[in-house]
Amino acid sequence: MQTTTYKIMGKTVAVMGKRPRVVKNRFGFSKGSTFMGLHYFKMSRYLSIPSLASRKFGGVADIKGK
């Protein structure tokens, strides 16, 4: 997954991620402890807003663990 971090005055406001899917199409919305996801066709887009998430995004360790 490729992520982009948005910061204002050195503080992380949001982390956005984009992941292409290889095998099957998926449609829907999901909400986990770190990311909210929007899935359509063979693309998944994720958004993590620290103030709304119950768990902070831990970087590469969170991506490889899934």
Image: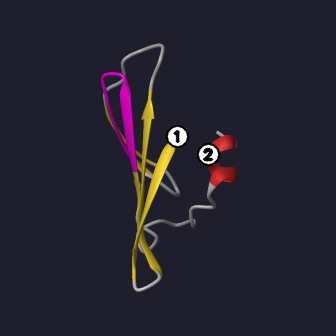
Q: Which residue is mark 1?
A: 1
Please count the marks in the image. 2
Tag 1 near tag 2, CB within 8 Å: yes
Q: Magenta residues, as a range? A: 37-46
Residue 21 rendering spot, x and y as whole percentages? 45, 24
Residue 62 rendering spot, x and y as whole percentages? 64, 51
The quarter of the displayed image where residue 48 is located: bottom left
Closer to the camera, 21 or 6? Answer: 6
Q: Which residue sits furthest bottom? A: 9
In the image, is residue 62 part of the stretch drawn in magenta? no
Closer to the camera, 2 or 32? Answer: 2
Secondary structure, mark 2, is: helix
Q: Is residue 63 left or right of residue 53?
A: right
Residue type marked 1: Met
Number of the label disc, if any, that sits on residue 63:
2
- Indicate whether 11 appears above or below 63: below
Residue located at (62% from left, 58% from top): 59
What secondary structure is the stretch in magenta mostly built from? Answer: strand
Secondary structure, mark 1, is: loop
Disc on the earlier residue, 1 or 2: 1
- Indicate whether 44 appears above or below 14: above
The quarter of the displayed image where residue 66 is located: top right
Residue type marked 2: Ile
